[in-house]
Amino acid sequence: MVSLTTHSITVSAETFYQEKLSKPDINEFLFTYRITIENRGPKTVQLLKRVWYVTNGLGKIQTIEGEGVIGKRPIIEPNNLHQYISGVHLKTEIGKMSGSYFMHQLIDDKILEIKIPEFKLVSPFKLN
């Protein structure tokens, strides 16, 4: 697991290779990831938008932008967290992801950019 804190918001990521849903013989690799967003600050925030940078093993970068996460725009109170699981398909057996969340700090109407730590996507057979 990797973690990064920006503006008192800690984002942690864990990745999982989905062997049963991947098809290495035709270069289809499915990875899931669990994201935990912890509000360690004194102010309530709402996640409005995300920007992901997905890099495959050949160095090709895909940018993915959208509202909220998995159809939600969660409000995260101080000392609370939001967790979700999502996934990504790659055409290579390794890759990486990073990005940012944009959060609305409710009390003073500020928009904060919260960095998502870079995390690796690696099929287990590539580790040998």
Image (tube, rainbow, N blue to C red):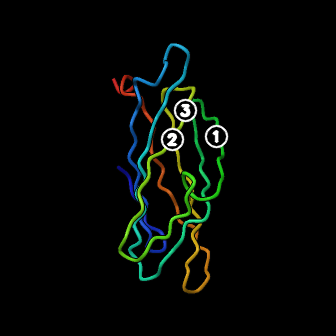
Classify mark 2: helix, strand or loop.
Answer: strand
Return the mark for residue 96.
2
Instruction: Report the residue at 37% width, 70% height from top.
Output: 80
In whole angstroms, how far apart are the C-alphas of marks 1 and 3? 13 Å
Question: Which residue corresponds to mark 3?
Answer: 89
Q: Is residue 33 above or below residue 25?
A: below
In whole angstroms, how far apart are the C-alphas of marks 2 and 3? 11 Å
- The x, y position of residue 101, in whole percent, is 56, 61
* Mark 2 vs 3, N-terminal side: 3
* Mark 1 vs 2, N-terminal side: 1
Question: Which one is in front, 55 or 14?
Answer: 14
For the C terminus, which image quadrant?
top left
Instruction: Report the residue at 57% width, 34% height from top.
Output: 56
Question: Which residue corresponds to mark 1?
Answer: 61
Residue flagged by tag 3: what amino acid is it? His
Give the residue at the far top of this rendering. Answer: 25
Return the mark for residue 43.
none
Instruction: Report the residue at 60% width, 35% height from top.
Output: 59
